[in-house]
Image (cartoon, rainbow, N blue to C red):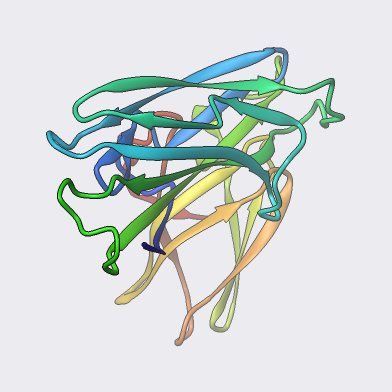
């Protein structure tokens, strides 16, 4: 039997995240920093196929994190069934209390071997992996998350735009446009800057942002 990892979905702007015939209920996790655990619902959308599910949490650099464990870390989900994945904090990680901290929730789904398959023959089983963002959010931040995208400011210089995020939240931007020029997405960390480059000079930047529920907000012009 051969397995091939073919898909990474980084928090796409939809209300669900999919890996093959398996879906998560959300495209992002907001984890309260004071909480000891949280949960996610996973659903096998196939009517006929079971999947082996492996899950874990990685840090902002993509390395497996020891700050959280996911239970169960390995299990089989049956056709048209749901299961609960639990995120549990390990110890007391040292997070800044004035801004969010980024992690990623990873879920790999490996389909079952079709009934009647010859065990001596080569069967290609396609393992798909979904990766969604998890924001650890301290209590009592200075502004609300809904105000974060509106507070962005831009500095224009030739083909580049420096986007400044003064808020304590990560801001996920999609559909960035300058005239006919487009960039699919960009994430700006809290209290930091990010430079976006286009092929031609930029005089204004239009963008949309993704809220806590995975919905896309209306267009804004970065001032």
**Is residue 99 shown left or right of residue 51?**
right
Compared with residue 156, is residue 139 higher up or lower down, i.e. above or below? Answer: above
Q: Position of residue 175 (x, y in %)?
A: 35, 59
Quadrant hosting residue 4: bottom left
Residue found at x 69% / y 43%? 190
Q: Position of residue 160 (x, y in %)?
A: 58, 77
Front in this rendered view, residue 200 or 122: 122
Compared with residue 68, is residue 86 higher up or lower down, i.e. above or below? Answer: above
Compared with residue 38, is residue 162 higher up or lower down, i.e. above or below? Answer: below
Q: Is residue 127 in sight in this rendering?
A: yes
Residue found at x 56% / y 17%? 38
Badge count: 0
Residue found at x 20% / y 34%? 45
Compared with residue 187, is residue 52 higher up or lower down, i.e. above or below? Answer: above
Residue found at x 33% / y 41%? 216
**Is residue 173 shown left or right of residue 124?**
right
Quadrant assignment for the N terminus: bottom left
Residue found farthest to the front: 120
Q: Position of residue 168 (x, y in %)?
A: 69, 35
Quadrant hosting residue 221: bottom left
Q: Is residue 207 in sight in this rendering?
A: no
Quadrant hosting residue 155: bottom right
**Is residue 55 shown left or right of residue 26?**
right
Q: Position of residue 93 (x, y in %)?
A: 83, 27
Front in this rendered view, residue 122 or 137: 122
């Amino acid at each position: 039997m051969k397995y091939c990892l073919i898909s990474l979905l980084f928090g796409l702007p939809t209300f669900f995240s999919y890996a093959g015939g398996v879906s998560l209920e959300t495209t992002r996790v907001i984890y309260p920093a004071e909480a000891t655990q949280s949960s996610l619902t996973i659903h096998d959308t196939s009517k006929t196929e079971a999947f082996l599910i492996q899950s874990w949490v990685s840090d902002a650099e993509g390395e497996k994190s020891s700050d959280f464990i996911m239970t169960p870390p390995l299990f089989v989900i049956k056709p048209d069934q749901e299961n609960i994945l639990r995120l549990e904090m390990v110890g007391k990680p040292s997070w800044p209390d004035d801004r969010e901290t980024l992690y990623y929730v990873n879920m790999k789904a490996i389909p079952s071997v079709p009934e009647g398959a010859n065990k001596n023959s080569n069967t290609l089983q396609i393992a798909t992996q979904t990766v969604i963002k998890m924001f650890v959010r301290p209590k009592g931040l200075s502004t609300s998350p809904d105000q974060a995208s509106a507070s962005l400011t831009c500095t224009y210089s030739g083909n580049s735009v420096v986007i400044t995020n003064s808020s304590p939240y990560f801001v996920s931007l999609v559909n960035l446009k300058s005239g006919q020029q487009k960039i699919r997405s960009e994430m700006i960390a809290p209290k930091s800057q990010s430079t976006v480059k286009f092929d031609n000079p930029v005089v204004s930047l239009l963008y949309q942002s993704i809220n806590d529920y995975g919905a896309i907000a209306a267009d804004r012009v970065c001032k």
